[in-house]
Structures are given as structure tokens and as C-alpha cells.
Image: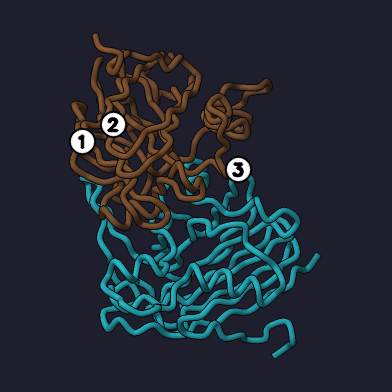
Chain colours: A cyan, B brown
């Protein structure tokens, strides 16, 4: 295995962030098959530009991106390309990252790990600061939408080892959080968050 | 007509902002029936707290709010209550406010009025500054969502004179933009943006 394909762990309930040059890609792996990974992408040169679900939906004309689609920023530019997706392709752009407020509303009386804090901690680990917590691309999160607009909290449709490959269309920073949600079945019916993995795939340019 | 019920114009293609005390309400009127009004709500005491669609969807369990629902902030708190909605209740939370980038992608080669700039101009008129342009609650905007997650740009289902009444659950600032979109049929098949109207309804407290 070359240095380029080193397998990194995204620990359960935690976040990580990586820098990618334009042309590099990241492979994000749903190791155990039912783990949601919240993902954010920022323009490395101007952190106020980032993947924005509300802009992406308008550009793509659908609720979630699939293989071949671009991930779109709040300046309506492509920041990543979904080069590969081995899963059934069901992801979510509707739901905010979980946060301490959310777990309080669900009944938690003590601090609960959450994706919002994981984003900021992960960015801190690489010496960067996110200007806010944008609405994340929730990889493998399955939010069925009924005809009347009602939503529900489904279980992932993915299987162990499913992965996506996202290729950078500009120098960017990708942050990921292995969602620590253990009170709703979005990480599987057993409500047991697990680790995921990722690889950096350097560009050939 | 008492001073309290003065009818204000939200001019076609423009924005306005108003301050509301907790308990006050605003009535927003779709005068000609097919005009989308982008709406934002900020906590008057801390503008970094605002109506957030991605948090609201998670709390409400549906894509758009209806009569009796609360509008939810990025701190998962109720900022407004939808007290009345005479329309079929079809609104949108999926699509970003239009902006100059958007009209450029649609083929405009010159500046086009847009809701993002209208938000900032309206806030400036009352001496406030929005920290960002949050994803707006697009009143009467009809975005059909198909079973496969694809979206389309529908015409409003509302009729002339339909209105909503939103009651403030905290001191807040409401900004509105009469969407200047004239290249897609979201403001009616004739693509002709019109003015709307609004009233401030003081609380009885």
C-alpha cells in the first residue's frame, strides 16, 4: 500500500478535517455500513465560501447529490465532484448538524457529543476556524420525504464498505463527523454509532 | 383604520425590514396572489440567532411550516408562530435566496435585482446588519418534490389576498423581499413580479 492510500480512521463520535489541493480526492468509507458521516467543504482560500445545501439543491434540481454531480457553494460554484458512490446513493441535505441544543430537546441532561462541536474541534486540529457550521451534507443519512412534505428518520440504506469519492474542484478543506446520534435510528436500528474510514487520493496533475 | 393596522407596501423587486416586540405579529399579504415573499427572522438582541430552515425541518418533521407551527432558530428555539395562513399552505424552505450569481447562471449579463441584496438593503434601512443571508422561508413558493428527490419550479398555489400572520415569540426583526425572479415561473406563469403588502399587529400584552 503506497503512502498515498493510507487508511485513516474517523473515530466513532468524533470529527476530522483534511486539506485537499484542487484535483485531489477523498474516499470516505462507511466501514460498518450504517454510519452517517456529516461532511462540510470550505474553500481553503476563503472560508466564507463553502458547500451550501440550499444553493446546491437549486443548481442540481434535487434534494441530494449523486454520482456525477457537483457539490455547489454559496457562490454557486462547484467545489467537489461526486466521482464515485457505491451505495444506493441516498444522502441527506435537509437536516442541520446535531448540536447540544438538539440533544437537550431529545431529553439529554448532560453534554452529548455532537457534529457541530466535532466540526469546530476538527478544524482546530488543523489550525483553521470555520466561520459557522453550515448545513452539512449528511452522507448515507436516510430522510424519507412523503408527498405531504413530512419527513422521517430512516435507517441508512448503505452496506459495509460502501464509499464515496469526492474530487476537489478547488483547493479546499473537508471536515467530517462520525455522527454520534444514538437516540434516533439514523445510524442504524441499534442506535450504535461506529467509526468510519477515509483515504486521500492525490490528483495526477 | 387605526394606526396599528396601517397597510404598508412591499414594493415589487424590493425588500423591507421591521422590528417586532415579543407578542407583536406581522400580517404578510400576497396582494396579487402569485408573488413569492422571501422572509427572514433574526433575534433582535443577538443577530447571530435566526430562523434556520435546516433546524426547523428537524424540529417540525416536515419541509415547510403550516398554521400552528413555530418557526425555529439555529439555537432550536421558537422565534415566531404561524398563527394564520389563508393560503393552501404551500411554502418553501429548500431553495437559497436568489443572488447575482444565480441570475448570471440563468444567462443575465447585467445586474439583476435579487433577494440576497434586498435583505441587506432592507436591514440597512433600519440601521441593522444581517451577519449573513440565511436560507429564507420562501412564502408561497411552490417547489414540488418527487419521490426520487427531484425538485421543480412550480407556480404559487395561493390566490389574491391570501395572507399569513406570524406572531413574535421574542423581540425580533423580520425582513422580507418581494422576489424579483422573472426568468422562472415561481412568481406565476407570466414571470411578472408584483408588490405585496404587510401590516404590523401589536400585541395585546
* Residue drawn 40% across the image and 14% down it: B9
Instruction: Check the residue under mark 1 and report the chain it is in.
Output: B
Whole-Å distance between the Cαs marked 2 and 1?
A: 9 Å
Disc 3 and disc 2 on one polypeptide chain? no
Q: Seen in the image, is A78 located left or right of residue B126? A: right
Instruction: Check the residue under mark 2 and report the chain it is in.
Output: B
Instruction: Check the residue under mark 3 and report the chain it is in.
Output: A
Query: Can you identify the residue that label 2 sits on?
Result: B25
Label 1 SS? strand
Residues A19 and A164: in front is A19
* Residue drawn 50% across the image and 45% down it: B47
Q: Are marks 3 and 2 in contact (CB under 8 Å)?
A: no
Number of residues whose C-alpha sits closer than 10 Å to that of mark 1, classed few (under 14), some (14–19) or many (20 or more): some
Disc sitting over residue B83 in the figure: 1
* Mark 3 or mark 1, whichever is nearer to me: 1
* Mark 2 or mark 1, whichever is nearer to me: 2
Residue closest to the far top: B1
* Residue drawn 43% across the image and 14% down it: B192
Number of numbered discs present?
A: 3
Query: Can you identify the residue that label 3 sits on?
Result: A76
Amino acid at each position: 500500500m503506497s503512502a498515498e492510500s493510507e487508511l485513516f480512521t474517523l473515530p466513532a463520535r468524533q470529527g476530522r478535517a483534511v486539506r485537499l489541493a484542487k484535483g485531489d480526492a477523498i474516499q470516505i468509507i462507511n466501514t460498518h455500513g450504517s454510519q452517517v458521516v456529516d461532511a462540510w467543504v470550505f474553500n481553503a482560500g476563503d472560508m466564507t465560501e463553502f458547500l451550501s445545501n440550499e444553493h446546491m439543491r437549486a443548481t442540481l434540481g434535487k434534494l441530494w447529490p449523486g454520482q456525477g454531480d457537483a457539490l455547489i457553494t454559496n457562490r454557486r460554484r462547484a467545489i467537489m465532484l461526486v466521482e464515485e458512490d457505491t451505495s444506493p446513493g441516498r444522502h441527506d441535505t435537509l437536516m442541520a448538524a446535531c448540536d447540544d441544543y438538539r440533544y437537550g430537546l431529545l431529553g439529554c441532561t448532560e453534554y452529548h457529543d455532537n457534529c457541530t462541536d466535532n466540526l469546530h474541534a476538527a478544524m482546530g486540529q488543523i489550525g483553521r476556524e470555520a466561520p459557522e457550521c453550515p448545513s452539512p451534507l449528511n452522507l448515507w443519512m436516510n430522510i424519507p420525504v412523503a408527498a405531504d412534505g413530512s419527513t422521517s428518520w430512516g435507517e441508512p440504506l448503505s452496506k459495509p464498505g460502501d464509499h464515496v469519492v469526492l474530487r476537489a474542484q478547488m483547493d479546499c478543506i473537508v471536515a467530517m463527523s462520525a455522527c454520534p446520534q444514538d437516540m434516533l435510528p439514523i445510524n442504524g436500528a441499534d442506535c450504535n454509532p461506529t467509526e468510519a474510514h477515509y483515504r486521500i487520493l492525490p490528483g495526477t496533475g
